[in-house]
Amino acid sequence: MIRQISVFVENKPGRLAAVTEVLSKNGVNIRAFTIADAGDFGIIRMVVDKTDEAYKALKEAGFTVRLTSVLAVEVEDKPGSLHRIAEALGDAGVNIEYVYAFTSEQHKALIIFRVNDVEKAKEVLERLGVLFKGEIK
Amino acid sequence: MYWNPAIERLSTEELEEIQERRLRSLVKTVYDYSPFYRKRFRDAGVDPSDIRSLEDLSKLPFTRKKDLRDTYPFGMFSVPLSQVVRFHASSGTTGKPTVVGYTANDIRNWVESLCRALVSCGVGSEDIMQIAYGYGLFTGGLGFHYAAERLGATVLPISAGNTARQVELMKDLGTTVIACTPSYMLYLSEYAEEMGVSIERDTNLRMGIFGAEPWSEETRKRIESKTGITAYDVYGTSELSGPLFTECAERQGIHVWADMFLIEVVDPETGEQVGEGEKGELVVTTLTKEALPLIRWRTGDITYVETDKCACGRTHPRIMRILGRSDDMLIVRGVNVFPSQIEHVLMQIPEVGEHYMIILDRREDGMDEMTIQVELSDRVEIDTTGDILRLEKKISERLKSVLNVWAKVEVVNPGTLQRFEGKAKRVIDRRKI
């Protein structure tokens, strides 16, 4: 499981910049990033190198922030990698609430999942040998 | 045309003579039968024998909505419950509802007052009157119903809502008069158009009696040009007895029947009476009410009074269009809403911070729209957009159950709503009335 930061932001000019300013000032590097949009507002989700510092700085700046543990899998950066996992989770009856992916020099392709049934998902992913157990650098 | 020509055309001196006599008797009655008023008079150092003429009126203490709430439900009643034949109650918008009781005479006088009013604006026994004010605890529906029946009109007691049916029956039954809120009339006419019905061409509707929310001359013109009907203003409050007074055909103010109600206009800050034609808060003393007589009742409505004789021949004073409220009450879609009540709901929801804004708009179709912006509490933790949408829905539902009116809720970032030094101004009313 890896730790993810979620931040609530209104859908208005300058709101994302307000978040990235805090991270930048605190020397936090963003490794993966996504925005879920719901009209008037959105949720920024990200995986960063210095999670605790980032959480504290955002909180102090007045943002609505949450730390969540999410599953990550490390797969070959090639066609069919995500499909294999999505299919296995689906067959096991696990619902994926959201998913996003990134690649980096240190890792192969990393896919981050939030699911409704973490234990079952872990089982499936371990069986496939793709569950990521390390630290995001 | 008059309903009660002898009384409606009494000279000012004769009316004052009746008012003085009734005031003396009222003061004595409430002092003898109501512990609430007895204590109030004693605290103010006034004895019933001090009230000899209308000039002595200002010696009497005011009563306010707060008094009705503090003595809920029956503390201000001045007759035993066995003599009460009906209750009405407010929606409980600021916490506790207020309960109003009526004796059989009170109902008769309510009907008398509104019959005079309806005849003065031209409703007669030939008319078919569609009553689209809410029935039930709200005083609008039943108030109009009894008066319209009493004067021999044909009543269509349809109540509020179900707009397609309103249009259909208006057309099929030949409705000539409608009573509803002005914003509902605008909505209804638009709805009719969508159904392919032109109120002007396809119905017999000739007039409407509109009230229960503030509205302007501009709205009057809009209603009249869209529908080809004549629009009249009605005044009443649930505490005084729902709808009581309307404009006469001259439409130069609303006649208040002086033999039944004694009116004053006071400076809302100081409580001092203001001069004729000057704006202030309307204060009403009920001269004939039995179950719940009100002495110097602060209505909260800002208006001014004209006492010169009206071209219609009626001698009773007229109040001019209500210009606003002296308290912070908002009227949204005809429903009384207090910001304090919204605050109360919000503060019970842990995910909500302490700052909020209330924004009121009026849509093209004349319907009010209320948006409540709330800041998230810094304690809340969210991870999905669903968390926020669920929170917005939860807040909306709680507000609806308390306010009886739907509000759109917008969650915003903590620290982004305006902060105030001193008195907060949390309402942005963008409606043009």
Image: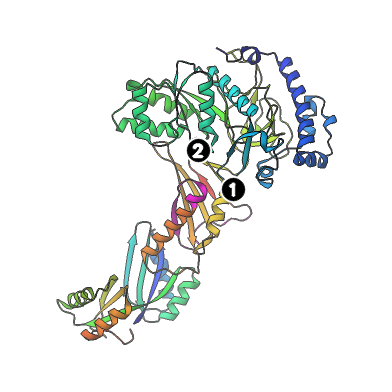
Residue shown at 25% from the left, 85% from the top: A126
Q: Is residue A89 left or right of residue B270?
A: left
Closer to us: B33 or B127 = B33
Quadrant of the image occupied by residue A83:
bottom left
Residue shown at 44% from the left, 58% from the top: B394
| Residue that badge 2 annotates | B334
* Magenta stretch: helix, strand or loop mostly: loop
In the rendered image, the quadrant that contains the N terminus of chain B is: top right
- Position above or below: B421 against B382: above
| Residue that badge 1 annotates | B94
Percent position (x, y) of residue B235? 57, 29
Q: Is residue B249 left or right of residue B275?
A: left
| Mark 2 residue type | Gly
| Mark 1 residue type | Thr
Q: CA distance from mark 1 to mark 2?
A: 16 Å
Question: Bounds of the magenta span?
Answer: B399-423
- Position above or below: A111 against B101: below
Chain letter for mark 1, please: B
Closer to us: A77 or B160 = B160
